[in-house]
Image: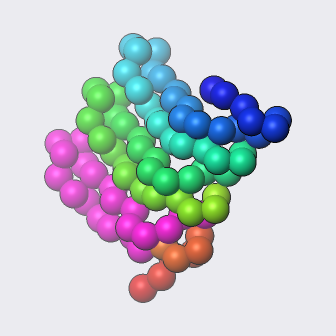
Amino acid sequence: MSYKSGKLDGEIKQYYSNGQVAMSRYFKNGLPEGEGKEYYENGKLSVLMFFKNGKAEGDLKHYKENGELEEIVKYKDGEIVD
């Protein structure tokens, strides 16, 4: 993790005990920004989402453990939209 002016800035990653990445996210001025990913313990992608100014924005895609797309949830300014 890196900090800029005392706030998170750059990519952070969390890991499972087996060493696989559990989550990766970018921060700018302490807020999530850009692409965020979550993974299953086997390393396959679970969630792909995007942030703008710390709020969810655009399509959140949730994948099954076999890699099949399960659902898409649309966000605008951090709120779910139809």
Q: Is residue 29 left or right of residue 75?
A: right
Quarter of the image containing the N terminus? Answer: top right
Task: Give me the residue at 24% from left, 42% from top.
Answer: 65
Q: Which of 32/5 is in front?
A: 5
Q: How is the image coloured?
A: rainbow
The percent coordinates of residue 42 (x first, y second) are: 28, 27
Identify whether 40 is placed above or below 76.
above
Q: Nearer the viewer, residue 13 or 39?
A: 13
Q: Is residue 72 above or below residue 9?
A: below
Q: Determine the residue located farthest toward the front in the rendered image.
A: 5
Q: Residue at x 27, y 51 (%)?
A: 63
Residue found at the very far right of the displayed protein: 6
Task: Confirm whether the magenta stretch covers residue 70.
Answer: yes
Whether residue 1 sits left or right of residue 18 in the image: it is right
Q: Residue at x 47, y 36 (%)?
A: 23
Residue at horizontal 34%, vertical 35%?
Answer: 40
Q: Determine whether 20 is above or below 45 in the image.
A: above
Of all residues, the one furthest to the top in this rendering is: 18
Does the magenta stretch mainly form a helix, a strand or a loop? strand
In percent of width and height, residue 20 lies at 37, 21
Residue 60 lies, in percent from the top left, at 40, 62
Q: How many marks?
A: 0
Horizontal and vertical percent for residue 26? Answer: 54, 43
Task: Using residue 20 as the reference point, say whether residue 23 is left or right of it.
Answer: right
Q: Quarter holding the C terminus? A: bottom left
Residue 15 covered by magenta stretch? no
Rendered view: 72 above or below 15: below
Q: Quadrant of residue 41?
A: top left
Query: Which quadrant holds residue 10?
Result: top right
For the record, the magenta segment spans: 55-74
